[in-house]
Image: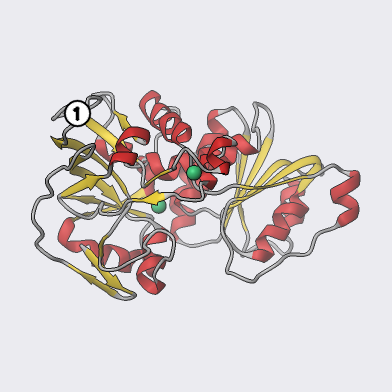
């Protein structure tokens, strides 16, 4: 599937790529749709897709089909996950140990295809072998799970804490699952509808319906014996919800701004609370090679079982329809099987 620009996704026959020096070519075993793909299809994406036309899709697991000259870490037939980006390792952010903020992140697309070529930098930094027991459709969650893991790490979520997650999209649910895997008590805040009803079965401590609550912050405080949450995570990307997240934590609480808001927006901040209650406000963006590896471990160990986030299974030629369902809010994640 080739992206030619906003609203223009085409099915094309391309030659199977041959690996150049340092490259791998994978046969894609499973790919997942993502809200980012929907956004990109609507309006393009200056960072992930700097030029068009380009192959499309970024969450996948596959099997090594061909190994380029000079690659010794992988062999034909290895099952792997590849992240959708690789940091440079040399810029100031990379040297400071924050490769998710790399000033020269190299993005790779092409999950919606039969084969994908991985460039040398990705092969050397961000391709992870899979245990035979880990199914490709679970392994394909490694990329979004790594983003969620970075946020949970930044907030230092611990056993016994109450973590409130605003937004019950697939990433909100992955954030909740990771917090629950650390024995935190998870309060999910969502909006009523079929997704809310379906996901309620995920078994978090509480589900709060933001559409039914007069004041969702009061509801969260009610669910935490009046104290407020230890950690609040926004996974909606809406400024008014960022504010609710800040208002929902108690003394010493941490707030993670995980959902990206529209450019130019801002929020109000209670300076008194932020200072005297020592609030910690954190951004969390993208993932690091370490988080990709640890996400694969979490999937292999069963600490996170994401199967319930797949609402549909479709063939490669149906990607357009899958993204359409996502755009209409009628799908969680669609598994694309070739
Ligand atoms: Zn994604
Ligand atoms: Zn860098």
In the image, is the residue at mark 1 within 8 Å of ligand 1 by its beta carbon? no
Q: Is residue 302 left or right of residue 191?
A: left
Q: Quadrant of residue 271?
A: bottom right
The residue at 68%/28% (across/down) is 160
Q: Is residue 239 left or right of residue 296?
A: right
Q: Is residue 234 left or right of residue 88?
A: right
Mark 1 surroundings: few (<14), some (14-19) or many (≥20) residues within 10 A? some
Q: Position of residue 280 (x, y in %)?
A: 76, 43
> How is the model colour-coded?
secondary structure
Q: Position of residue 275 (x, y in %)?
A: 88, 47
The residue at 46%/50% (across/down) is 104
The residue at 64%/71% (across/down) is 264
The residue beneath circle 1 is: 78
Q: Is residue 43 above or below residue 217?
A: below
Q: Position of residue 43 (x, y in %)?
A: 41, 73
Q: Is residue 120 visible?
A: yes
């Amino acid at each position: 599937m080739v992206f030619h620009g906003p609203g223009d996704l085409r099915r094309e026959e391309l030659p199977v790529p041959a690996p150049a020096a340092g490259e791998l070519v994978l046969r894609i075993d499973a790919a997942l749709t993502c809200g980012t793909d929907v956004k990109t299809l609507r309006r393009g994406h200056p960072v992930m897709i700097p030029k068009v036309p380009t192959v499309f899709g970024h969450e996948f697991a596959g099997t090594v089909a061909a190994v380029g000259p000079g690659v010794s870490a992988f062999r034909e037939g290895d099952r792997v996950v590849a992240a959708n980006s690789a940091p440079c390792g040399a810029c100031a952010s990379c040297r400071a140990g924050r490769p998710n903020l790399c000033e020269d992140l190299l993005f790779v697309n092409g999950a919606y295809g039969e084969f994908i070529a991985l460039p040398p930098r990705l092969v050397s930094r961000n391709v992870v072998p899979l245990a035979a027991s880990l199914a490709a459709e679970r392994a394909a969650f490694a990329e979004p799970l790594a983003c969620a893991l970075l946020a949970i790490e930044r907030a230092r979520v611990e056993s016994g804490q109450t973590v409130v997650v605003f937004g019950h999209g697939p990433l909100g649910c992955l954030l909740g699952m990771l917090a629950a895997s650390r024995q935190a008590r998870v309060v999910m805040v969502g909006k009523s509808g079929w997704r809310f009803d379906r996901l309620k079965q995920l078994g978090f401590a509480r589900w709060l319906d933001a559409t039914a609550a007069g004041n969702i912050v009061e509801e969260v405080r009610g669910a935490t014996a009046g104290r407020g949450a230890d950690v609040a995570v926004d996974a909606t990307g809406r400024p008014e919800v960022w504010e609710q997240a800040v208002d929902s934590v108690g003394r010493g609480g941490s707030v993670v701004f995980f959902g990206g808001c529209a450019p130019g927006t801002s929020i109000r901040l209670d300076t008194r609370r932020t200072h005297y209650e020592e609030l910690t406000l954190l951004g969390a963006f993208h993932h690091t090679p370490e988080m990709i590896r640890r996400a694969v471990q979490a999937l292999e160990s069963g600490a996170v079982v994401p199967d319930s986030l797949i609402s549909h299974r479709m063939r490669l030629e149906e990607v357009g329809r899958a993204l359409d369902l996502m755009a209409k809010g009628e799908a969680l994640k669609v598994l694309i099987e070739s």
